[in-house]
Amino acid sequence: MQEDKLRHLLGLHLHGRMSTAETEELSKLLQDESNEALFISLLSDMMEASAGGSGEYDPARWETVRQRILEADTGTPVVPVRRYWWKWAAAAAVAGIVAAGVWMYLHKEHMPAATVSMEGRYKNDVLPGGNRASLTLASGQVIDLDAAADGKLAQQGGTQIRKLQNGQVAYTGDEPSTVAAWNTLVTPRGGQFRLTLPDGTNVWLNAASELRFPTAFIGKERKVELTGEAYFEVAKDASKPFMVKTASGIDVQVLGTHFNISAYDGAASAVTLLEGAVAVNMKKLAPGQQAVQLNGQIRIRPCDTDQAVAWKNGFFNFSDADIETVMKELERWYDVKVRYETDVSKLRFGGGMQRSLPLTSVLRILENYQVKFRVEGRVITVIQ
């Protein structure tokens, strides 16, 4: 009965034929988090039906439907519930996963049909990461930023360190500095953080990352050191080039621009330029290009900038990604470990979903595509 009602209302909603009363009824159903798995399953069925059973997602065919959902959600009241599930559903439409029926796709390559039951496999859930980081001052003092109160955190020379009401940390100069001390911002697995450097440059630090920087930029350059991933919006200063150095050997030099650097240990490093101009190991990039370090060499290629910065905007975004790439992101964001009981290396995923979803919701989406998981504590086991 519930499935028939939800299917009927979703069909009306997707095709723009809902009355006010029906819109309110659908909203109430989606406020009930127990309908989550059913909601995802029904939308997946609709996607496959729209593709004629081929399993291929055609973005053009769903664009007008996606716009209707966005317009309808704008006028629908959001009632707070645990983890704001309807709010996720509305925002997910922005990423395309509602209108497209969670448009993850898979190159099957003769993979066997999944037969393992979901019952009993999810022993618990794991909440997504959030704003968590620690700041190590030049003195060695460590400040737990997510626990620290808003306001002044420390004073180092002529630089004041403050935690703002929005949760980010900002360095501001009260007076000119002639000596710079070095600080280190570290995000754990399951953490992210935003920082404003002394020159006004904004930095978003992804999970399991580290940024080392001075409390004042003196001399002829502004240099910071990065391990992991960060998005930079560099304050313009033609007299002082901004430089980012990574442990992997990537050196980025800019004057004022927006770019993303991914330099995790054990993975290929990449610099993606969104705006302005940068030089990566002396090779210049134009907006929309990415420099990738492969076997010690820098290669320049066009790229999807939205995908590169999806994490900063609150989404996972995969493009023909193998399962190990997908699970590495889940490991960092949910602070979990992944084990494999079967070879699923042929699986390829594309599409997006919100990073604000709890872990089991993400896994249920992936399970629509011939892979199964078991969750016990903070361990995910790939079992089929």
Image: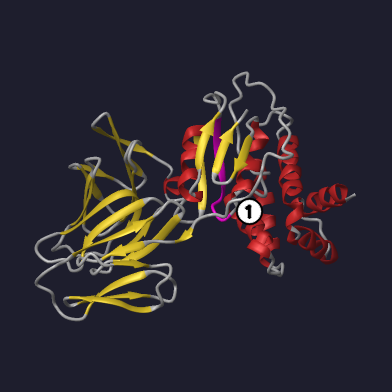
Q: Examine the structure image and report whether residue 376 is included in the region drawn in magenta.
A: no
Q: Which residue is mark 1?
A: 93
**In the image, farthest residue toward the right:** 1
Q: Is 362 or 96 nearer to us in this picture? A: 362
Tell me if I can see residue 61 in this picture. Answer: yes
Q: Quadrant of residue 294?
A: top left
Residue 321 appearing in the image: no
Give the main secondary structure of the magenta stretch: strand
Q: Amino acid at mark 1?
A: Ala
The tally of labels here is 1
Where is residue 4 drawn, in percent x and y? 87, 47
Residue 275 position in % (x across, y down): 33, 54
Give the image quarter of residue 356.
Answer: bottom right
* Stretch in magenta: 348-356
The quarter of the rendered structure image containing the C terminus is top right
| Residue 243 as seen in the image, left or right of residue 273 | left
Q: Residue at x 64, y 62 (%)?
A: 83
Q: Is residue 205 left or right of residue 50?
A: left
Going 82% across and 66% down the picture, which residue do you hit?
20
Q: Position of residue 322 (x, y in %)?
A: 50, 31
Membership of 353 in magenta stretch: yes
Residue in front for this viewpoint, 4 or 279: 4
What percent of the width, then of the height, locates residue 143? 33, 68
Residue at horizontal 44 percent and vertical 72 percent from the top: 166
Q: Is residue 76 above or below residue 327?
A: below
Q: Residues within 10 Å of mark 1 (few under 14, many from 20)?
A: many
Q: Nearer the viewer, residue 285 or 172?
A: 172
